[in-house]
Amino acid sequence: MGGFADNTNHLSGYKPWTPEDPNTKNPRVIYADNRNSRFDQDRWVEKGSYFKIRQMTLGYSFDIPRVKEVFDNLRVSITGQNLVTFTKYSGLDPEFKAPNLWVKGLDNAAYPSPKSVVFSLSVQF
């Protein structure tokens, strides 16, 4: 349900062109025709600019005399990768990698870069 070929887009909030509403951004629905859903139209092109915090590390080295009696060095840290992306891109990730040279710029709902958080403790005796 919801494809162009079976003419059910109006059921999922699709607002097509009609003579009464000619100022919509969507083309008219054509029964049993997928010409309006093809990806080679410029109506699917959108701005892909983004700002991403790819990696951030926050750490603390303990320089306390009582700690220095036991350890030569004690450090704790937390590192995050792909924490946040600021973009108006409607896909999952504006930094997708095209599967080959011929489909450059087509994300095909590619998986986004995974987010990760790592806690670490470094101890030297």
Image: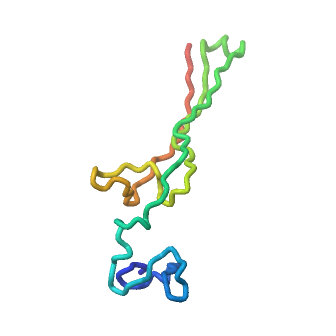
Give residue 11's position: percent from left, percent from top.
Answer: 49, 83
Count of marks placed on residues: 0
Q: Please say if 30 is above or below 87.
A: below
Towards the viewer: 4 or 58: 4
Q: Which quarter of the figure has residue 119?
A: top right
Residue at figure coordinates x 58%, y 32% from the top left: 57
Give residue 15's position: percent from left, percent from top.
Answer: 52, 80
Q: Please say if 103 is above or below 12.
A: above
Q: Please say if 36 is above or below 101.
A: below
Residue at figure coordinates x 51%, y 57% from the top left: 89
Q: Please say if 62 is above or below 110.
A: above
Classify residue 38 as left or right of residue 60: left
Quadrant housing the C terminus? top right
Residue at figure coordinates x 37%, y 60% from the top left: 108
Classify residue 24 as left or right of residue 29: right
Towards the viewer: 121 or 86: 86
Give residue 31's position: percent from left, percent from top.
Answer: 36, 87
Classify residue 97 as left or right of residue 48: left
Quadrant housing the N terminus? bottom left
Classify residue 122 as left or right of residue 6: right
Question: Furthest residue to the right?
Answer: 65
Give residue 84's position: percent from left, percent from top.
Answer: 57, 47
